[in-house]
Amino acid sequence: MNRKIPSLLTILALLLIGAPSEGSPKGNEVRLCKIEVPHNLQDASFTLAYRFETTRQGKLIHITKIRNDFLPDAPFHACMAQWRLPSVSGQGVAEFSRTPTEGWTEIHISGRGFDQTFSYH
């Protein structure tokens, strides 16, 4: 009986360690950057979008604006340059969403092999 307990615990531990959480494949890193919004835009809702490519190691390169008519691009580039997305194969898109009542709400990232939303709240 004593031999069965450690082996069952070992199997359970291996199953838990080996199974990445759904939508969060191993090795992906996304930091939720709090990008400042000017006072005159505090009452606005908007979604900004950027296209990017990934290296084999998941580093984001060639970050280009798709939609951002309100804010400077540099803070978004700096934020995304910190991410690692080895699960994205080739090109991807990141959409930053904001509302007046909640501020930044989420970042939705999609690409071949990846589709996940990261919530600020």
Image (cartoon, grey):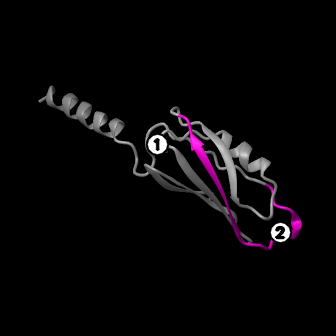
Amino acid type of the residue tagged 2 in the rendering: Leu
Residue 72 spot, x, y in % from top left: 82, 54
Residue 89, compared with residue 121, is above or below; it is above
Was residue 101 drawn as part of the magenta stretch in this picture?
no
**Mark before the other along the chain sequence, 2 or 1:** 2
Q: Residue at x 14, y 30 (%)?
A: 4
Residue 16 spot, x, y in % from top left: 33, 40
The quarter in which the N terminus is drawn is top left
Residue 82, compared with residue 1, is above or below; it is below
Residue 94 spot, x, y in % from top left: 60, 54
Residue 87, compared with residue 96, is above or below; it is above
Give residue 37's quadrant in the image. bottom right
Dot 1: what SS? loop
Give residue 55's quadrant in the image. top right
Q: In terms of depth relative to the viewer, which is nearer, 9 or 66?
A: 66
The quarter in which the C terminus is drawn is bottom right
What's the magenta region?
A: 36-55
Q: In terms of depth relative to the viewer, which is nearer, 32 or 46?
A: 46
Q: In terms of depth relative to the viewer, which is nearer, 62 or 40?
A: 62
Residue count near mark 1 (Cα–Cα under 10 Å), binned few <14, some 14–19, many ≥20: many
Amino acid type of the residue tagged 1 in the rendering: Ser
Q: Which residue is drawn at 80% across and 64% down?
A: 70
Was residue 48 drawn as part of the magenta stretch in this picture?
yes
Looking at the image, which residue sits at the far left? 1
Mark 2 to mark 1 CA distance (whole Å):
34 Å
Q: Name the residue under label 2.
A: 41
Q: Name the residue under label 1.
A: 87
Dot 2: what SS? helix
Q: Residue at x 77, y 73 (%)?
A: 44
